[in-house]
Amino acid sequence: MDAIVKSATSPEIAAEIYVASLLAIDVDTADEKSYLAMLAARLKLPPELVMELNRQVESQVDVS
């Protein structure tokens, strides 16, 4: 995870990394939720942004 976090050279890239992780896994276990929470914290994403990203991804996945 260190390499992933270090590659986030801007807030926009950090958000993209978070969304990519969110899309790559089915968030249905405590471990997966914990991973995403840790990733968001390490990427220094504001909680409001994380909630919005989660909402956007969920709405896109529900439409498909």
Image (cartoon, rainbow, N blue to C red):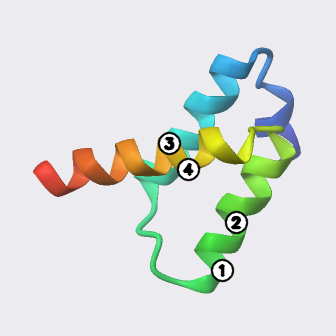
10 Å crowding of disc 3: few (<14), some (14-19), many (20+): few
Q: Which numbered mark, 3 or 2, is in the foreground of this view?
A: 3
Q: Are marks 4 and 3 in contact (CB under 8 Å)?
A: yes
- What amino acid is labelled 2 in the image? Tyr
Q: Is residue 9 above or below residue 35?
A: above
Name the amino acid type tagged 1.
Asp
- Residue at mark 4 to residue at mark 3: CA–CA distance: 4 Å
Whether the residues at callouts 1 and 4 have beta carbons within 8 Å, the answer is no
The residue tagged 1 is 31
Which tag is nearer the camera, tag 1 or tag 4? 4
Q: Position of residue 37 (x, y in %)?
A: 72, 61
Q: Residues within 10 Å of mark 1 (few under 14, many from 20)?
A: few
* SS class, disc 3: helix
Label of residue 35 in the image: 2
Q: CA distance from mark 1 to mark 4?
A: 18 Å
> What residue sits right under mark 4 in the picture?
51
In the image, residue 15 sits, relative to residue 47, either above or below, namely: above
Q: Which residue is label 3 attached to?
A: 52
Q: Is residue 21 above or below residue 35?
A: above
* Circle nearer the N terminus (1, 4): 1
Which amino acid lies under the numbered mark 3 shown in the image of this protein?
Glu
In the image as oriented, which residue stretches furthest toward the bottom? 30
* Mark-to-mark CA distance, 2 and 1: 6 Å
Q: CA distance from mark 3 to mark 1?
A: 21 Å
